[in-house]
Image: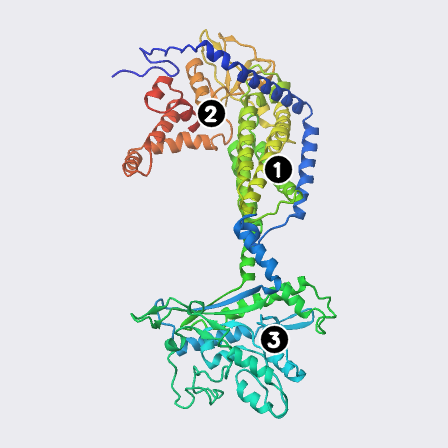
């Protein structure tokens, strides 16, 4: 069986691919882009060196500036108006809404409170006297709502929408009509006498009981008052509106009700009405001519026979109309009831909102839990409350997400070797991104860009992911400075190599979001502008402030102090290791930092993969002096990937006595290499992956390559391409 080639060597018969020769025209066309790239990298190098030289000042000024912008969140405005969020500015819908308000005025507007009843058992017919009785119970509970505000009591009769009170010459009759004039309520109960119970007005005439809609017969009243006052004009109005007997001439849902008027069609025979027949064609309010409620406004899930007659329905709906805030303000402006409270339109709006919330609460609690029907109440205030609640920032969710990112950054960048650990850098980077997001949103508030649900629920996490990605990229590049880099130029070298990528990605993201701001929908436009500004703040923080954090961490590592607890010295710097002499042969031994004792010259080396501190005694080896900058040696600057270091050490130096640091195996790399990878290589795991691959649920090839890369170290480039996976992919995957 043929033996595989040693690690780090090419297989026999490997032929290096011929290097293509570029035409001369390409060299000329690439001259300008290469010059621009080199010029930009030179600027980044100078920027990095300057930040490293004045890292403390840059960090202080950056935090001060971002903190000042974050204070702009105090003036943030959350928009919950659907028209302002989703109606395109200048569109036909916007023009029609503006035209309606201009021609009809705010007084013509009203708000709708809906009461919907459905059976608990799906498909059950709701056109029964019992179901309508439950609907009456819920509607009565809702219509009796009263709220106390500004020292006044507000009920439905005060705030409901009325079609217009007629002007009567007789003052007594005019005041009576004003008190009795009904609210506009679209309900299936208007087909029956019980619809009068929802009207709460009442009036008093000498020698008569209180006049209410449940006992009011307008025709009879006019005949009784005719000999005393002239009501000819009022009689003509009633005839024109076809009021007739109003509600007392309609059938009773419950003929056994003691208050059922004698004029009701079923009062004498005591038979329950045919609900489907009564509701066919809709119902009428107190005016048969001007108040006709179609079936579609009252019923849902209707079923008809072949002749078109109504047979059954699955839902009932009643709609209570209230005045608009402007109309309520105008109605009570100058009234004796509001002259002492400084009546304003804002107060009128608050009265309506408070009443609507109470309406929804009591309506949903009107029926017992064991009832066969269920009530659903809805009002515009309910929708506004839902939008407002969803638009509010969930503190627990945001804090939890950022804490998880803090933990992830700390765990992935923490090392047991204090010289290579960057846990504090990860924590500082995530906190810096959080501050940049807050400052970006604060700047949006200062610019007058309103917030919405997308801003508060999506943007904080989107910006966190974009910013933390650049943080990890810079931190990883900072630890892999080329050998021989001067200590004073470490940050400049890092920005020179990775700053271009960070700048291009951030600028592209900002341009994309600014282009999305061309969408005419106000909510999406505001979100796009805010996202672009937040990405710009993230970019500024990553390119200016975070390099100062890395520079401070560089000083910490140079002083050999602990990672997170930087006030304490690292125990790794003074650790004594027990060794055994070994014969190494005539080889050149790569070494790191030299530690001299009184009797033995020992050289310590830290493996980046297993975090082992190795001490070598070379009695015959030729020693290579350590570089002038200890932070640029292999101890601090691993070249390539972890497996590259492992492969080089296994192929170059002999075995040495090693002793692990305490708890050196407690890291993700050790778990992936020695526990997770062997698990994937087991027979049952391979069979499971093959089965999933055949069913189209998982691709096994990348997993196999990743495991082989973890297990065998670096492969020849030709071998990796023969297996169909680029070398860069399995290096990064491991």
Task: Residue 628: name its quadrant.
Answer: top right
Frontmost of labels 2 and 1 is 1
Question: In the structure shown, which secondary structural element does the residue marked by tag 1 occupy?
Answer: helix
Which residue lies at the image location 42% right of the left edge and 29% below the top edge?
Answer: 733
Residue indicated by mark 2 = 609
As measured in the structure, the alpha-carbon distance from the residue carrying label 1 to the one carrying label 3 is 60 Å
Looking at the rendered image, the quarter that the C terminus falls into is top left
Q: Is residue 603 visible?
A: no
Position of residue 366 measured from the top left corner of the image (x, y, whole percent): 49, 73
Q: Which mark is residue 436?
A: 1
Check whether the beta carbons of the residues at disc 3 and disc 2 lie within 8 A of each other: no
Residue indicated by mark 3 = 165
Frontmost of labels 1 and 3 is 3
**Mark 3 Cα within 10 Å, few/some/many (few <14, many 20+)?**
few
Looking at the rendered image, the quarter that the N terminus falls into is top left
**Mark 2 Cα within 10 Å, few/some/many (few <14, many 20+)?**
some
**Looking at the image, is mark 3 or mark 2 earlier in the sequence?**
3
């Amino acid at each position: 069986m043929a033996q595989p080639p040693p690690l780090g060597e090419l297989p026999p018969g490997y032929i290096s691919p011929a290097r293509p020769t570029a035409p001369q025209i390409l060299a000329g066309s690439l001259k300008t882009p290469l010059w621009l790239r080199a010029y930009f990298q030179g600027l980044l190098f100078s920027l990095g060196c300057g930040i490293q030289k004045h890292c403390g000042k840059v960090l202080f000024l950056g935090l001060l500036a971002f903190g000042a912008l974050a204070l702009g969140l105090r003036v943030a405005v959350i928009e919950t108006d659907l028209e302002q969020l989703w109606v395109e500015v200048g569109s036909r819908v916007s023009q029609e809404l503006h035209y309606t308000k201009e021609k009809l005025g705010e007084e013509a507007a009203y708000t709708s409170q809906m009461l919907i009843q459905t059976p608990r058992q799906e498909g059950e017919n709701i056109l029964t006297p019992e179901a309508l009785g439950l609907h009456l119970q819920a509607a009565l509970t809702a219509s009796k709502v009263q709220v106390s505000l500004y020292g006044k009591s507000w009920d439905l009769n005060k705030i409901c929408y009325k079609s217009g009170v007629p002007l009567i010459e007789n003052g007594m009759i005019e005041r009576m009509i004003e008190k009795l004039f009904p609210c506009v309520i679209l309900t299936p109960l208007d087909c029956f006498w019980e619809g009068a119970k929802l009207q709460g007005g009442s009036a008093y005439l000498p020698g008569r009981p209180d006049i209410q809609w449940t006992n009011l017969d307008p025709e009879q009243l006019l005949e009784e008052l005719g000999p005393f006052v002239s009501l000819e004009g009022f009689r003509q109005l009633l005839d024109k509106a076809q009021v007739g007997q109003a509600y007392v001439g309609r059938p009773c849902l419950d003929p056994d009700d003691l208050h059922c008027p004698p004029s009701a069609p079923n009062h004498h025979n005591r038979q329950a009405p045919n609900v489907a027949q009564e509701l066919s064609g809709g119902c009428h309010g107190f005016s048969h001519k001007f108040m006709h409620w179609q079936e579609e406004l009252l019923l849902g899930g209707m079923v008809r026979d072949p002749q078109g007659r109504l047979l059954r329905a699955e839902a009932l709906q009643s709609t209570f109309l209230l005045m608009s805030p402007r109309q309520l303000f105008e109605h009570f402006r100058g009234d004796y009831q509001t002259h002492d409270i400084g009546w304003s339109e804002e107060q009128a709006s608050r009265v309506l909102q408070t009443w609507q919330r109470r309406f929804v609460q009591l309506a949903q609690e009107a029926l017992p839990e064991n009832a066969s029907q269920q009530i659903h109440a809805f009002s515009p205030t309910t929708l506004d409350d839902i939008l407002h609640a969803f638009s509010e920032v969930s503190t627990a969710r945001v804090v939890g997400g950022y804490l998880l990112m803090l933990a992830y950054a700390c765990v992935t960048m923490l090392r047991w070797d204090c010289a290579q650990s960057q846990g504090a850098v990860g924590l500082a980077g995530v906190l810096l991104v959080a501050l940049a997001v807050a400052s970006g949103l604060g700047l949006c508030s200062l610019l007058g860009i309103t917030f919405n649900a997308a801003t508060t629920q999506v943007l904080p996490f989107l910006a966190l992911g974009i910013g933390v990605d650049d943080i990890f990229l810079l931190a990883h590049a900072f630890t892999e400075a080329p050998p021989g880099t001067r200590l004073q130029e470490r940050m400049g070298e890092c920005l020179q190599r990775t700053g271009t990528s960070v700048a291009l990605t951030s600028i592209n993201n900002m341009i994309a979001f600014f282009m999305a701001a061309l969408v005419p929908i106000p909510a999406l436009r505001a979100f796009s502008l805010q996202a672009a500004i937040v990405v710009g703040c993230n970019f500024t923080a990553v390119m200016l402030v975070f390099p100062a954090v890395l520079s401070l961490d560089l000083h910490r590592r140079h002083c050999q102090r602990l990672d997170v607890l930087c006030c304490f010295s690292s125990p790794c710097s003074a650790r004594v290791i027990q060794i055994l002499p070994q014969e190494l042969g005539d080889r050149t031994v790569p070494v790191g930092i030299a530690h001299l004792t009184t009797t033995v010259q020992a050289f310590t080396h830290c493996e980046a993969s297993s975090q082992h501190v190795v001490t070598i005694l070379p009695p015959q080896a030729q020693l290579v002096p350590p570089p002038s900058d200890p932070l640029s040696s292999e101890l601090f600057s691993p070249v390539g990937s972890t497996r590259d270091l492992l492969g080089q050490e296994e192929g170059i130096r002999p075995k040495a006595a090693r002793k692990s640091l305490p708890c050196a195996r407690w890291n993700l790399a050790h778990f992936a290499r020695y526990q997770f990878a062997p698990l994937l290589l087991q027979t049952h795991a391979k069979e499971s992956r093959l089965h999933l691959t055949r069913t189209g649920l998982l691709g096994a090839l990348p997993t196999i390559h990743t495991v082989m890369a973890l297990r065998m170290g670096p492969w020849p480039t030709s071998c990796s391409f023969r297996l169909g996976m680029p070398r860069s992919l399995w290096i990064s995957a491991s």
